[in-house]
Image (cartoon, helix red, strand yellow):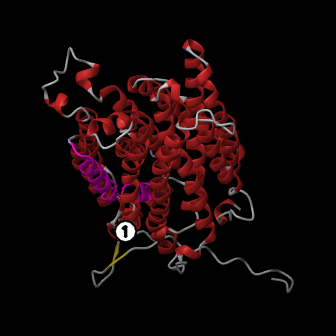
């Protein structure tokens, strides 16, 4: 060999898999197969959909529930109390999400997922039996605090997919989640107050007449029972290696296989992670406020700038928007992510949301078919754009950390997002009540002010997707 020749590169260390380790089994399967993990993603989609249903299922009947609980003294005050009840779930989740993320990193994704679905079954049913305002808030608070689902499922969908399939995995979670957030209100709208909506089926003195909001909650709980049974076959993805002393050690797959262990960074000092989480939180604040305002605006009287819809009408709009999400996820999102990239697709979706939000208050001048067409189209496009933004920022978060920190990272994201989302319904309810009392103001009267503030939040989120604020993880460089 001549003096000028460069030394041959060292061979890559051989990969090592541990027998009995569920994480290694998943890594071996990903290495041996290039196919899409349809079975695992099906479980992910089903459990995510069911877990998200209770979050927004109350919105179509929230206005009427506050009336029945007789806590508001005036009609204009209903939005105030509705906001705090809508926020209670997010407050509970905000306090507990980091804990559930750390538990998922310690004992595995599957146990936390199972427990979260079980808590949904119990406390969602109890919420439907609420006859006092304090009982409704308490059950929603516990429902949020004991549902640690979101952090482990986001880590799980990344871990069962190869690198080129991660967009599909994350979009499955976010589409199922978004679908649940949209179908949930549809269930609430169709099934709440059944003795009034379907008097020929449900009698006023029946259990559903005495508890007018039990039926939608009970239906969701039954779906959760089916999801709980189905996810018994969900394979674990966390690495668990048993050494000669029988101690259990968890490690990142690539780290284990190469006989090296990269030091774990402090998550709070990981700016690619934290910048994407903050952006994600701003978009979540917007989306939650939008969900509550849309439901309150459509059912409020036209004299207050609303559309005078029934809860059933709102349910129909949201059902169509939910069906659009499924089509979008299957046929459009992967192509958009591949064409524009994760960051640019997020920016595109955020920018396009702004004119759609701005158009809503002017729909009060429409009626009949023209109103229906405009409202349905706007709701369908808005829901698809929201999923694009959330999927993009979630991908950035999960690729900014190794597997051993992924549950905790998603826990931090869920906690901060929940705090933002807990502020959103309360703030939206207060602002909505205030806006209804200023119908004749000269500066953005009535609901125009509500939608203006929604758009300002969207603009802030869009700005946060650019440098110098957003730091891109190495995975995307």
Q: Position of residue 74 (x, y in %)?
A: 38, 38
* Residue 34 visible, this orientation: no
Span highlighted in magenta in the image: 130-156
Assess whether residue 31 is covered by the magenta stretch. no
Label 1 residue SS: helix
Q: Position of residue 89 (x, y in %)?
A: 36, 52
Q: Residue furthest right?
A: 4
Going by the image, does 292 lie left or right of 192?
right
Q: Nearer the viewer, residue 300 or 416?
A: 300
Q: Nearer the viewer, residue 294 or 108?
A: 294
Quarter of the rendering containing residue 125: top left
Q: Position of residue 329 (x, y in %)?
A: 54, 37
**Which residue is found at the position 61% from the left and 31% from the top?**
360
Quarter of the rendering containing residue 189: top left
Q: Which residue is mark 1?
A: 99
Going by the image, does 162 lie left or right of 86?
right
Going by the image, does 283 lie left or right of 345?
left
**How many circles with numbers are drawn on the protein?**
1
Quarter of the rendering containing residue 339: top right
Which SS does the magenta portion mostly show?
A: helix
* 60 up-or-down from 91: above or below: above
**Which residue is found at the position 36% from the left and 39% from the top?**
58
Neighbour tally class for label 1: few under 14, some 14-19, many 20 plus, Cα within 10 Å: some
* Residue 342 visible, this orientation: yes
Q: Nearer the viewer, residue 239 or 443?
A: 443
* 448 up-or-down from 162: above or below: above
Looking at the rendered image, the quarter that the C terminus falls into is bottom right
**Which residue is found at the position 63% from the left and 70% from the top?**
271
* 254 up-or-down from 78: above or below: below
Assess whether residue 145 is covered by the magenta stretch. yes
């Amino acid at each position: 060999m001549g003096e000028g020749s460069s030394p041959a590169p060292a061979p890559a260390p051989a990969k090592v898999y541990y027998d009995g380790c569920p994480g290694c089994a998943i890594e071996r399967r990903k290495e041996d197969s290039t196919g899409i993990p349809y079975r695992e993603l099906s479980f992910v989609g089903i459990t995510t959909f069911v877990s998200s249903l209770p979050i927004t299922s109350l919105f179509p009947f929230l206005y009427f529930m506050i009336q029945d609980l007789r806590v508001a003294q005036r009609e204009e005050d209903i939005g105030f109390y509705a906001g705090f009840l809508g926020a209670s779930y997010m407050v509970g989740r905000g306090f507990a999400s980091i804990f559930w993320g750390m538990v998922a990193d310690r004992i595995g994704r599957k146990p936390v997922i199972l427990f979260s679905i079980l808590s949904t079954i119990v406390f969602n049913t109890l919420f439907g039996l609420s006859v006092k305002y304090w009982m409704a808030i308490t059950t929603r608070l516990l429902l949020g605090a004991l549902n640690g689902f979101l952090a482990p499922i986001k880590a799980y969908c990344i871990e069962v997919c190869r690198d080129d399939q991660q967009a599909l995995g994350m979009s499955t979670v976010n589409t199922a989640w978004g679908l649940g957030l949209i179908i949930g209100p549809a269930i609430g709208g169709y099934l709440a107050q059944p003795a009034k909506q379907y008097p020929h089926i449900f009698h006023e003195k029946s259990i559903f007449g005495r508890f007018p909001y039990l039926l939608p909650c009970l239906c969701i709980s039954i779906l959760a029972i089916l999801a709980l049974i189905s996810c018994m076959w969900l394979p674990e993805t966390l690495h668990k290696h048993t050494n000669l002393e029988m101690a259990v050690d968890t490690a990142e797959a690539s780290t284990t296989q190469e006989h090296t262990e990269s030091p774990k960074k402090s998550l709070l000092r990981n700016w690619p992670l934290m910048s994407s989480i903050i952006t994600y939180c701003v978009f979540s604040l917007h989306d939650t406020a939008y969900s509550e305002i849309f439901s309150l605006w459509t059912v409020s009287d036209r004299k207050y700038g609303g559309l005078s819809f029934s809860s059933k009408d709102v349910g129909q709009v949201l059902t169509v928007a939910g069906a659009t999400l499924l089509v979008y996820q299957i046929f459009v999102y992967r192509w958009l992510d591949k064409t524009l990239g994760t960051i640019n697709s997020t920016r595109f979706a955020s920018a396009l949301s702004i004119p759609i939000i701005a158009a809503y208050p002017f729909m009060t001048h429409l009626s009949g078919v023209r109103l229906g067409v405009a409202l349905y189209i706007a709701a369908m496009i808005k829901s698809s754009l929201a999923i694009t933004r959330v999927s993009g920022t979630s991908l950035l978060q999960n690729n900014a950390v190794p597997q051993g920190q992924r549950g905790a990272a998603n826990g931090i994201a869920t906690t901060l997002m929940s705090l933002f989302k807990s502020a959103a319904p309360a703030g939206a309810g207060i602002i909505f009540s205030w806006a209804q009392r200023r119908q004749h103001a000269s500066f953005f009267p009535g609901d125009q002010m509500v939608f203006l503030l929604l758009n300002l939040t969207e603009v802030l989120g869009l700005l946060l997707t650019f440098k110098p604020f957003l730091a891109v993880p190495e995975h995307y460089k």
